Image: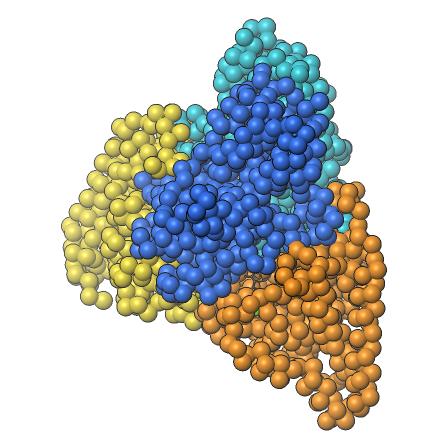
Chain colours: A blue, B cyan, C yellow, D orange
Amino acid sequence: MTNERELTMAKAIAEAIDQEMERDERVFVMGEDVGIYGGIFGATQGLYEKYGAERVMDTPISETAFIGAATGAAAEGMRPIVELMFVDFFGVCMDQIYNHLAKNTYMSGGHARYPVVLTTAIGGGYNDAAQHSQCLYGLFAHVPGLKIVVPSTAYDAKGLMISAIRDDNPVMYFFHKGLMGLGWMKYHPRSVTPTPEAPYTIPFGKADVKRAGRDVTIVSLAMMVHRSLDAAEELAKEGIEAEVIDLRTLVPLDRETVVNSVKKTHRLLVVDEDYHSFGMTGEIAAIVAEEALDYLDAPIRRLAVPDTPIPYSRPLEQFVLPGAERIAETVRTMMG
Amino acid sequence: MTNERELTMAKAIAEAIDQEMERDERVFVMGEDVGIYGGIFGATQGLYEKYGAERVMDTPISETAFIGAATGAAAEGMRPIVELMFVDFFGVCMDQIYNHLAKNTYMSGGHARYPVVLTTAIGGGYNDAAQHSQCLYGLFAHVPGLKIVVPSTAYDAKGLMISAIRDDNPVMYFFHKGLMGLGWMKYHPRSVTPTPEAPYTIPFGKADVKRAGRDVTIVSLAMMVHRSLDAAEELAKEGIEAEVIDLRTLVPLDRETVVNSVKKTHRLLVVDEDYHSFGMTGEIAAIVAEEALDYLDAPIRRLAVPDTPIPYSRPLEQFVLPGAERIAETVRTMMG
Amino acid sequence: MNLTKEQLLAMYRQMWTIRHFEDDMAAAYMEGKTPAFDIGSGPVPGEMHLAAGQEPVAVGACMHLRKEDTVVGTHRPHHFAIAKGIALNKLTAEIFGKATGLGKGKGGHMHLFDVEHKFSCSGIIGASFPPACGAALAAKKMGKDWVAVAFAGEGAANQGAFHEALNLAALWKLPVIFIIEDNAWAISVSKRQSTAIPDNSQRAAGYGIPGVRVDENDVLAVYEVVGEAVQRARRGEGPSLIEVKTDRFYGHFQGDPELYRPKDEVPTLRANDPILRFGKQLLEQGIATQADLDAARDAAKADVNAAFAFARQSPYPAPESALEDVFVS
Amino acid sequence: MNLTKEQLLAMYRQMWTIRHFEDDMAAAYMEGKTPAFDIGSGPVPGEMHLAAGQEPVAVGACMHLRKEDTVVGTHRPHHFAIAKGIALNKLTAEIFGKATGLGKGKGGHMHLFDVEHKFSCSGIIGASFPPACGAALAAKKMGKDWVAVAFAGEGAANQGAFHEALNLAALWKLPVIFIIEDNAWAISVSKRQSTAIPDNSQRAAGYGIPGVRVDENDVLAVYEVVGEAVQRARRGEGPSLIEVKTDRFYGHFQGDPELYRPKDEVPTLRANDPILRFGKQLLEQGIATQADLDAARDAAKADVNAAFAFARQSPYPAPESALEDVFVS
Ligand SMILES: Cc1ncc(C[n+]2csc(CCOP(=O)(O)OP(=O)(O)O)c2C)c(N)n1
Ligand SMILES: Cc1ncc(C[n+]2csc(CCOP(=O)(O)OP(=O)(O)O)c2C)c(N)n1
Ligand SMILES: [Mg+2]
Ligand SMILES: [Mg+2]
């Protein structure tokens, strides 16, 4: 790996899309500011220059129309990649997403196919407040019919994007703004990784053990993988070895890797940047309580946004977002 | 209680609204077919005749506009009750609900008040298929800023509705179609209860132990409370005493009643008509795994819709909806 | 109008197919629901929205369409599905919840998908507009002269999706035709109570596209107006908006007490039955004989009978199959 | 136009308040972001949308409004908030994320709420339309002659909410005025790329309400047109739609590389500065002296300076206060 070129996550995503657009004429991109601008978070940079306005289409601010149009175009055999600029905006177009794109295949008895990749930006930490900082993937994972992909590194991002584009089902692909490697937003350096140039796929439903450890299992995704890894480094100095699992996809969900890890470590902490209640942390905790109850040496713990909207002001936002220190501290209380 | 008149849940809800409209001029009703029709599920029956079109307003099929208008009217001191005919339709108006109605109070630093009651119909069992049979309250409970009320009996429905109308916060009030006591849809007879005529309130965040028992705790809400009670009756014949907890509100959530019950029974089954993953059942299971792990004598179990859209055909729908028999069977496997 | 006798009789027959289908469905729907009506019982449970009286819209419009053209229908979808050419057997079986149905019983009456005939529909009001734009976009990208038609009720014209889709279609000059069925009612809410202007076709001006109102519930009038729009779309000149006045003979759904509806409304509408009028016209203009008409009607009835028999004889899906088809592999 | 000298100078001063505010905010925003721009650093983090150049819309419109009238603004909200009369101190403190801000630091630049002055805004495009209808509905129900104004960008006019709200307002004759700021851009997407017709005010016809386009970025032109709409609304005659051509001097947000924008566009716009033009007009028409103008501008600057000083000196909220205010008690 050492000789391989490193990419930011944004570049890795754009490269994956580029390679698939070259490979398959049916792939095209739609969304707000995906053209000349290259996507507000750079996920489509360079594509407009290469493929032109016919295959990289700027849209009006009409998410219901253009996401619904992606469904309609997919039914005809096209393979649209469509961007919802921030996941926070889902409320203006959720019906087309979850009542149609997600359910049509089932309602058709499996006859109709909708190979749509719906990309969207998630995450806070840069003070963009309550309507521009959410994660919300748990909500989309709750309703059936959407595959849910949430990468944390450039390497994963590229392979998962190619898998998403080649999948014949609707895939929602969430990229965390703070992992994109943008010039204008602080990003976690660990998101920049060696990334092969040749196209490759990463299968859905395979969690990645980003760090092995024997004492506690930390389950997470996106930015919180890195915060957990940061915490794990601190804890290692104290002799506590945390295993950090990056779920990578919520649907399908790799229950096995989580459960096996807990069976080994006997402790579970779930860390999430989404809201605490009725979301990802609850689901993972429940699975372990169902399947590995007898292996637990300590109560399951969860760290997530404490059921408040994301506040604007820096000290407030920092208070609600789980950080490495709080993760480490929580693990310490579990070891006692 | 024996001498008290019995009401259906629909009548109890309409009576609660009626009494509050009489008491408070600022209360009014908006929605599709809430006027002459009396609400498709009867929640506003009789109100149009009594209060007229000014206070019981039929709307165009423009959920974004009229639910957003409820927020705007509430900001001016009015107290709108607004109906989203089926919760399944939330996708056309979710932005006004969760980005505005739910968050504005927080974003205003607590200065702005939005006393809106958003009523909506939930539930399947009558073959209305994937776009008209969902529960989805878990999704609304996941995003902060909405109180979430889900009654299972006429008595609870009336008291919770009066509390909802008098609350200065946005309240989402979910009524299950199969509990409304409609002339044209089978309903669970246990939803019809003695209901005092005089107005009364039921506080939010207080679960109701609908049946006491020592052997297993079944946590549920809406229709599944009754299915669980049916199962409990069967189990009682076999000497298994199930405690059935009706959560009644998801936000605020009565963790204490759940946890204390599990500490007593040492077993937890969560039953839900919402989708299995990333929802209510996971949250309840997680809370117990956090707070009562050492009390559990058996793995936590969950029964819910198995992450498929609700299918249309009767045998298919019956297969995905948890029923009394499956609940009883699951409890039996937990007792071994 | 350059329709041959065969074509005219085919339209007449199709209107009868729809009418028989809806009337027979109304009867089948009530099976198991008497004396006590229970929406969830009988061989056809769930909500049931019938389009008897609205045949002119579907038949007049779809007469211009080919198999490769896309139609997106509504919660009241049978007439569109039949006019688009979906196999009656599979259609009926789906509504009976059978394994032989279009969606193996998973979709049901409001969710009919036929990939071969490029038909779909939805129970969500206003949801037909965006996917029709997408189908039209795909046709354009593939260099085909295919068109897409989105049907919707007049109530749907007040949904945000209407506006967004019309703008998008006009902006991108998509080959899509938006057809509004104005049956005067959205459940119990009249058009006057819901729509700020009397004529939705006037909204076309807000998108710089043609807007036409068909003021009669007449299959040939619809045929003519839609024909121009379809030609225009196939020529690459972009979308059109058409509103057609039509009549809902049944309640909003079966079981609707219709207390909101003036008592004499339905009898008046039924006295102006668009199929009977069309038949009379064919007779009077000497295009068809009574025998032609009877034969068409009988053939329609035979088709419907066969489809219902097929549906009734078909097996239910296996319960566990509920777990399949969330995703394709 | 029956504006007194005092009123005209007040408008002039308010335009300068806005301009100074935006320019000073642009500078404050860059603090802590040089040499390496990081959106999350400095005293004012997060996205920042400035309205310099767009003063005529806010000032010309709000001049007609009283405290009891409601204004709902957009993601680019400062000019509306200032024109509606919100206390500059609290406004600025909120944007600096301070405990003394309008929302105790919880809302921030895109989420300014002032219950006293009946102002709110949202970062979601098109979201201003529905709540303004609700405020107008409440006024009507309470028998007041209050009006509500929803501002939005030209990009927002393609959101479904626009259509639904206009129909609802027209249907119910609500005292609401919809004002579209056409600054030609929605981030990098031009109006021509997003909107099927050149003039959004023409969409009013789809709702049977008056639609007017103001083709100049001129405060008095806006004042006149909005005045008629406000009078109409107060008289109970219902809503109006107004589109105003205006100019965005800065990027979409601060830090926008603006590669999509023709290089000479901003200089051309700035050469036609609406505040300077207005000042010149007041001079030329002999309404004000240069001293009057200078005094107004200086007073505006002093106000802005004081507000920024207040904001900077104010304390941050306690971290744990993040958990408060989800619900009121
Ligand atoms: C978004 C949404 N809102 C509300 C409904 C409930 N609903 C079903 S049919 C209907 C009336 C539709 O009226 P129209 O569009 O005129 O069609 P018609 O029934 O007259 O054919 C309503 C309100 C729905 N299905 N979807
Ligand atoms: C529903 C929604 N979609 C997209 C965005 C992202 N976004 C923020 S501002 C903007 C452009 C808005 O353009 P316009 O309405 O013309 O206002 P302007 O910025 O020109 O003032 C977009 C697309 C959003 N905030 N909300
Ligand atoms: Mg209708
Ligand atoms: Mg703009």
Residue D14 position within the rendered picture, expressed as x and y whole percent measured from the top left? 76, 75
Residue B203 position within the rendered picture, expressed as x and y whole percent measured from the top left? 75, 32
Q: Quadrant of the C terminus of chain C?
A: top left
Q: Quadrant of residue D28?
A: bottom right
Q: Quadrant of the N terminus of chain C?
A: bottom left
For the question of whether residue C257 can be seen, the reply is no
Identify the residue at image location x=66%, y=39%: A324
Q: Which of B8 and C155 lies nearest the eye of the viewer? A: C155
Q: For the image shown, how many numbered marks are present on the structure?
A: 0
Q: Which of D287 and C114 lies nearest the eye of the viewer? A: D287
Side of A262 where C143 appears, left or right: left
Residue B21 position within the rendered picture, expressed as x and y whole percent measured from the top left? 72, 45
Q: Quadrant of ligand 2?
A: bottom right
Identify the residue at image location x=30%, y=44%: C114
Residue B315 position within the rendered picture, expressed as x and y whole percent measured from the top left? 39, 26
Identify the residue at image location x=55%, y=79%: D265
For the question of whether residue A331 can be seen, the reply is yes
Identify the residue at image location x=40%, y=37%: A203
Residue B139 vs D135, above or below: the answer is above
Q: Quadrant of residue D135?
A: bottom right
Side of D307 where C282 appears, left or right: left
Side of B154 where C54 appears, left or right: left
